[in-house]
Amino acid sequence: MSVIHDQPAPVDPTPQPYSSWTGPGGPSVPGNTEEGPGGESRQPSPRRRVLAITASLSLAAAAAGGIIWAAGSTAQSTTTLTTTQITAKTDPALVDVVSTLGYQDGTAAGTGLVLTSTGEVLTSNHVIEGATSIKVTDVGNGRTYRAVVVGYDRKDDIAVLQLQHASGLKTATLGTSSTVKTGDKVVGIGNAGGRGGRPSAAASTVTALGQSITASDEVSGTTEQLTGVIRTNANIKAGDSGRPLLNSHGQVIGIDTAASSDYQLQSGRTQTQSFAIAINKAVSIARQIETGRSSATVHIGATAFLGVELSPGSQGGLPGSQASPGVIIAGVTSGSPAARAGLQSGDEIVSVGGHKVASSTGIQSALEGYHPGGKISISWLDQAGQTHTATLALAAGPAG
């Protein structure tokens, strides 16, 4: 079974104004695009990571528990709402997230959820991963703000943004994922197609709880394990990344993160399915980020930047290579710490911060605890097999 992260959509240079809307499902992105699994819309040269996920379905696990962080109305309604009523209630608390991917020469869009009236926003980490600048348009008031990354959890695909100089924003009504049941009716509302404008809504049904999915990145070769996720038969499009999943009372019970279009039913038919991070887990991570508590998985503040592009799935093997090969450099960003230290395309990184590395994941993990301005030791082999070691002062880099 092939599953991908709900992809941030390539941004149309002329997004729709808020007075224009083409109806449920949202407009498609024009231009030369190709359709990927699960409704992914991407340019022929993808600017975003594409994750092929094999899902290990464990029906016994329960949705993540925890204390719900109050955002928006704290009263838990028992009134059942129509999809139209849920959309009207939720739309003002949503934002369109547009990430400029400066080092990849691209732009991508996704969805976010307003947590506080002063502009704290919850979204998927892969919406802002690689972003060198982020702009967020609030659906409630139509204004666009510059956003900074407060922190993120790459493992659980959650990020918190802070909108600059924001006030008086409408906030979402959070529910609890601990009471979600298989068969519950849910609605996902997001920036389908990445066009902006009025969000589109897709009604669906919860088909399983407590799912575990292992994601492997086809571009970088990295993997991630998402656990306790909610599975639905929702239709998800590019740009829906980070959209809220709401129960029949209009309360957020999950954040959509991944989708698949080839799940095979017992009847032999295939069915679209999507996966959402349980809101209890998402809020727990957001609270940790808000309080500035970093961990092995949670990064607070700006991302440290080394400035190397790594060959996906490649390992070392240059003359003089150690028994445990390192990672081949595919490119070096001009003016970056790596470039100033003398690293070049074709060199092989063998250790970072005193830790041997054999994959891009290893390098990523070694850099996780560092921030811009921090110094780190890098050892590498050049193409002639000569060993080099340098201490680099890391720069500020893209988010996530």
Image (tube, rainbow, N blue to C red):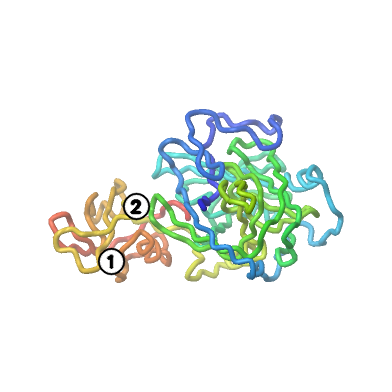
| Up/down of 386 relative to 83, above or below | below
Real-space Cα separation, disc 2 to disc 1, in angstroms: 18 Å
Across and down, in percent, residue 100 comes to: 48, 42
Give the left or right position of residue 303, taking residue 190 as reference: left
Residue drawn 70% across and 63% down? Answer: 177
Across and down, in percent, residue 3 comes to: 53, 51
> Label 1 belongs to which residue?
351
Dividing the picture into quarters, in which one does residue 314 lie? bottom left
Across and down, in percent, residue 203 comes to: 72, 46
Q: Are marks 2 and 1 in contact (CB under 8 Å)?
A: no
- Whether residue 169 is visible here, answered yes or no, is no
* Image mark for residue 202: none
Mark 1: amino acid: Ser
Give the left or right position of residue 221, taking residue 214 as reference: left
| Up/down of 26 relative to 354, above or below | above
Provide the secondary structure element on which disc 2 rests.
loop
Disc tally is 2
Mark 2 / mark 1, whichever is N-terminal: 2
Provide the secondary structure element on which disc 1 rests.
strand
Mark 2: amino acid: Pro
Q: Residues within 10 Å of mark 1 (few under 14, many from 20)?
A: many
> Label 2 belongs to which residue?
312
Give the left or right position of residue 98, taking residue 197 as reference: left
Q: Give 245 or 112, whichever is nearer the viewer.
A: 245
